């Protein structure tokens, strides 16, 4: 049982790093583009919050889907746990390396929605393959 919990923790952690990796790479690419073109980011602040929400949902979807694919049961729990791990990873990395305080509620909600949608998609795809 202990080895199984260690394997689950590693899978959740790997999925959360994939989810946050997608978010940080895409966010840095957009930030680089906006500053390279001379656009003022404050003007696009409202648009960037919407874009950031979409990125977090997509990142949660990717992580939740990939971890849930490995499960036979409790796929929604796997998606939700991966999403919450991704939020924790983002909180730690943003505080340590970027120096920004993560606005918790909407990021956690976006990750959770994406993780559950990814798990639902994984469940849908696996049920179609069985029949």
Image (tube, rainbow, N blue to C red):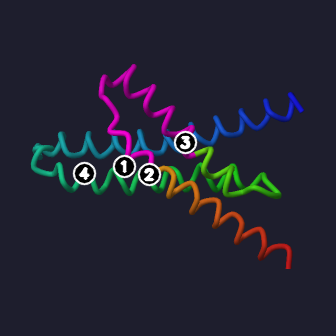
In the picture shown, does residue 69 fall above or below 27?
Answer: below
Assign the N terminus to one quadrant of the image.
top right
Q: Which callout, 4 or 1, points at the residue further toward the start of the chain?
A: 4
Would you say 30 lies left or right of 80 here?
Answer: left
Mark 3 = which residue?
A: 84
Q: What residue would you read off at disc 1?
A: 106
Q: Is residue 51 above or below residue 87?
A: below
Residue 4 lies in the magenta-colored region:
no
Give the Cα distance between marks 1 and 2: 5 Å
In the rendering, which numbered label is found on residue 109?
A: 2
Q: Secondary structure at mark 3?
A: helix
Location of residue 85 (image quadrant): top right
Q: Residues within 10 Å of mark 3 (few under 14, many from 20)?
A: many
Q: Position of residue 39 (x, y in %)?
A: 11, 46
Give left or right: position of 83 versus 39: right
Q: Residue furthest bottom?
A: 131
Identify the residue at image location x=30%, y=28%.
100
- Which segment is the magenta one? 83-108
Label located before the other in sequence (1 or 3): 3
Question: Could you tell which of marks 2 and 4 lies nearer the N-terminus?
Answer: 4
Asked whether the beta carbons under mark 1 and mark 2 sit within 8 Å of each other, the answer is yes
Q: Which residue is mark 4?
A: 48
Q: CA distance from mark 1 to mark 3?
A: 12 Å
Q: Secondary structure at mark 4?
A: helix
């Amino acid at each position: 049982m202990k080895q199984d919990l260690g394997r689950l923790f590693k899978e959740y952690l790997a999925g959360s790093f994939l989810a946050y990796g997608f978010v940080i790479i895409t966010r840095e690419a957009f930030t680089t583009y906006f500053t390279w073109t001379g656009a003022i980011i404050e003007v696009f602040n409202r648009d960037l919050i919407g874009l950031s929400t979409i990125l977090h949902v997509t990142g949660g979807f990717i992580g939740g889907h990939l971890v849930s694919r490995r499960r036979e049961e409790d796929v929604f729990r796997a998606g939700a746990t991966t999403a919450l791990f991704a939020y924790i990873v983002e909180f730690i990395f943003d505080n340590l390396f970027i120096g920004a305080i993560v606005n918790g509620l909407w990021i956690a909600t976006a990750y959770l929605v994406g993780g559950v949608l990814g798990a639902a998609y994984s469940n849908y795809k696996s049920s179609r393959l069985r029949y």
